[in-house]
Amino acid sequence: MVDSDGAVPFDRSRTGWWLFVALLALAAAYLAHAFVGLLVTGVFGYYATRPINDRVDQVIDADAVAAAVTVLVVLVPVIALTLYAGFQFVTGLADVLGNAVDPLSLAAQYFGLGEVPASEREALRTLVENPDEFVADPRAAAQTVLARGATVVSAVASTLLFLALSITLSYFLLENDDVLSTALERLFGGRDTTAYAYATALDADLESVFFGNFLFVVVMFVVATVAYAATNLLVPPAAGIPMVLVLGFLTGVASLIPIVVGKIIYVPILGYLALQATRTDGLALALVGGVAVAYFLALDFLPQTFLQPYISGRDLDGIMLMFAYLLGPILFGWYGFFLLPILFVAMLEAVRIVLPELLHGERLTTTATMADSVGADPQDEGAVPTDDPGESGTGPTADGE
């Protein structure tokens, strides 16, 4: 039974349902906490590839096929490249550090795998550094790894399962985002509610951040790899830059950090080339100086000045995002790289859209009343009706009144 004003009178059965929903919410929160790494990785994959999926969907006109193409052509190769670059970097670091520090043990502890025995670390190192042995005699190689690297094999299997589930979550979100958007709109009470305006701004900002940064990393990876490969064509083979693909990838990732950008990678490379110039005939310091100028322009000045402001989270402050990316892994672990930016954007939009009205005791609106130049505009992104009392004396309230 509903009153004339649309309100529902007190009903004990509704109280029971609220308690049941609260219990389910607690269970959902526990599951989200237990699998937070999987969830945030899947969400990152979704937002990082959604604009690409939308373009593909316009051509194919089939949500499931477009999502599958996006995941297989874009997301899976990027993840595979990331794993390859990570393995190569860890093993290269192990060769440089020798017995002083074991990067494999540090990586295992950082990713929650515990202390890996020395014999199993050696098995993993053999797997990464000498893949030809596995191709030549896969049966014997597999027996060796299983015998000496049970923990490593288990960890690798768990990692692959984790990535498969994360990719599947990204695929599910790409395929069903229209359905989920409609369901959330109904749950929030329509487009003229504060909840819908907040969700719309949050959604737009997350796409801007993750897709912009993803695109910027890919572009800088390609530019850096080409630059390092071109350098190897100019210098004698004995003085060439090793692991061009890996260093190019690391330069792309480092480019996310404002001011620092690729310096953390290409400056040591320049130091290596300068050292080689003193030891190798045919490599002059003047050539190294020319390479330094080219690196500064291609990997530093031009990207920071023209490229990064345009495609990398252009609606949000880059310095704030830098803190989110740097502090996230320190605070939460590896998945903090994705989680803290999400929390940062969620807090930012709450401050812009909800907090001023809550503090002043005013009715909630569907507009951002603070920091208009930062973050997405709900009216532009989600076709949220303008909630301006000056235009209409009967504008909607946050409760849908």
Image: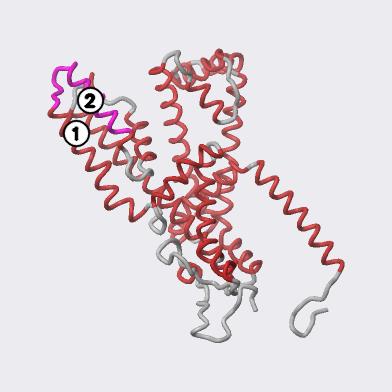
The image position of residue 333, as x and y in percent, is 55, 36
Chief secondary structure of the magenta portion: helix
| Rendering quarter of residue 296 | top left
37 on left or right of 133: right
Q: Find out whether residue 20 is within the magenta segment.
A: no
Q: Which labelled disc corresponds to residue 273?
A: 2
The kind of secondary structure element at disc 2 is helix
Residue lying at 45% horizontally and 35% vertically, measured from the top left: 82
Residue lying at 53% horizontally and 66% vertically, measured from the top left: 353
The kind of secondary structure element at disc 1 is helix
Q: Nearer the viewer, residue 57 or 101?
A: 101
User: What amino acid type is highlighted by mark number 2?
Assistant: Leu
Q: CA distance from mark 1 to mark 2?
A: 9 Å
First-in-chain label (1 vs 2): 2
Q: Residue furthest front?
A: 360
Cβ–Cβ under 8 Å for marks 1 and 2 = yes
Residue lying at 12% horizontally and 29% vertically, measured from the top left: 286
The image position of residue 148, as x and y in percent, is 59, 14
Q: Which residues are magenta?
A: 265-285
Q: Nearer the viewer, residue 96 or 330?
A: 330
| Rendering quarter of residue 149 | top right
The image position of residue 293, as x and y in percent, is 18, 38
Q: Which labelled disc corresponds to residue 291?
A: 1
311 on left or right of 159: left
User: What amino acid type is highlighted by mark number 1?
Assistant: Val
373 on left or right of 291: right
